[in-house]
Amino acid sequence: MDFNNLQEITIVLNDIGPEDVIQIVTDNGSNFKKACKLLAEEYPHIVWQPCLAHTINLILKDIGKWDDHKAMIQSAQYICQWLYNSNSVHSMFKSATGGELVKWNATRFGTNYMFLESFMKKKDQFMIWMMSTEYRSSRHYKTEAGKYAFECMTSVQWWANMQYVINDVEPLYSFLRFADQDKTPTLGEVLMEYGSLKRTYHTRFHSDMARCDRIMEIVDRRLASVFEGTYAHTACAVHPYACYAFGISENVFGDLRKGLEKLFDIDRAARALQEYELFRRKLGEFSSDLAARMAKDRGTSPASWWAMFGSETPHLQIAAKRLLSQCASSSGCERNWSSFAFIHTKLRNRLSSMKLHNLVYVHYNLRLRIQRATATVEASEFDPATSFMDLSLYRQTRPIEEWMQHGRSNRAPTLDEDSDFADPPVPAQILTDLARRVGEPVNVDD
């Protein structure tokens, strides 16, 4: 399995070019870790970066195994199944609470807490519904599950326990939202967000440090693979916001040296380390008020900042632009699987591999264009040229719509078996069964 993964990764790597790749982001599976370790023997500058979103999901899984968390999740799930297993109960529940619950996903452990949060938001409506005459006079109140739901959702202690469980993981959700984004590269900010997470937990549980330490022990153990042997520390060391907002101490030189040694040869790494002192001490172009203003402006990408102010440190500029253009999660790639599932269904299951990839490519990019066209753009992110490009979809002549409606009307459609990139056609099952029964070919001309 490790060798197969290595082969697949090597094929993609050769298509892109090994010199243009510095990290490979996958989930935390041991097979991927071993494959990337073998790859690093041939390309020392390429490191394995565990997916941060997947790592946080594993943290939530570990916390969910605690007895109090496990009991609360199972209790709420039992009530939820009762609410949705009967159409009449479901109708009463929707009418009383004004909406639905967020359902959990068996492989996404964070959704257990999203489910509890949706339960908590309807606390008052649930308690009013449980005490209403409509529910207590219904046949559902007399069932075993109905009595259990009544006892739980009318108990102040049950709701207090649920809030207690949610409080344990709420800071992790801010960390997960940061990790699970496609909008901007995040590798250089992982360390800063981790520091913010620690401060939040210490502030929230200042009166119960034992519980804080218990949570942070799981967080630190899981995040060790995210920080060790990766470019996360190096990317944070060259992040302009970290330098101008917090300041950078001399303690980062060790992590910076290790990262630059992987990226460059000895001579270029030495020059980049010498140039780093100008950046750390804010000398030369880094001393201007404009550089400080742009560094603290969250609307300016770190890589763009280095392109504007890093001309005096060319070797460090190259390293910073490469490091600060990296992501820390593979969530964007994993979202493509939903597009594959949408297009390749049980009924539409004979698409060729190339055609399926082309359809997913078009579907995913159209969805991105729709998101950009309908989203509210922040002032710092507005690009007039891009908006004009989007408006081309809605011009009065509508050339794209005309092409979609009439582009194939002048000729016969191309079938899969006539396509250059289609797989060889497969005979229908009825024909193959008939051939097996007959046993010998039949000349239809006779």
Image (cartoon, rainbow, N blue to C red):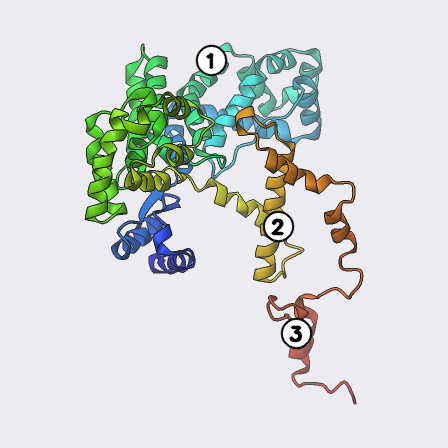
Q: Nearer the viewer, residue 419 or 162?
A: 419
Q: Pointer 2: residues within 10 angstroms few (<14), some, or many (20+)? A: few
Q: Pointer 3: residues within 10 angstroms few (<14), some, or many (20+)? A: few
Q: Which residue is mark 3?
A: 432
* Apparent side of residue 228 relative to residue 301 in the rendered image (left or right): left
Which image quadrant for residue 167? top left
The label on residue 160 is 1
Q: Does residue 152 appear in this view?
A: yes
2 vs 1, front mark? 2
- Which residue is drawn at the image coordinates 37% and 22% (left, top)? 292
Q: Nearer the viewer, residue 86 or 321?
A: 321
Which image quadrant for residue 131? top right
Earlier residue among tags 1 and 3: 1
Coordinates of residue 31 in the picture (x, y in percent): 34, 51
Earlier residue among tags 2 and 1: 1
* Apparent side of residue 157 relative to residue 214 in the rendered image (left or right): right
3 vs 2, front mark? 2
How many numbered dots are placed on residues in this image? 3
Contact (CB < 8 A) between labels 1 and 3? no
Coordinates of residue 92 in the picture (x, y in percent): 70, 22
Residue kind at label 2, given as amino acid type: Val
Q: Is residue 20 above or below residue 433?
A: above
Earlier residue among tags 3 and 2: 2
Coordinates of residue 77 in the picture (x, y in percent): 53, 28
Q: Is residue 112 above or below residue 402?
A: above
Residue kind at label 1, given as amino acid type: Ala
| Local secondary structure at mark 2 | helix
Residue kind at label 3, given as amino acid type: Thr
Q: Which residue is mark 2?
A: 362
Cα distance in 3D space between marks 1 and 3: 64 Å
* Apparent side of residue 285 relative to residue 336 in the rendered image (left or right): left
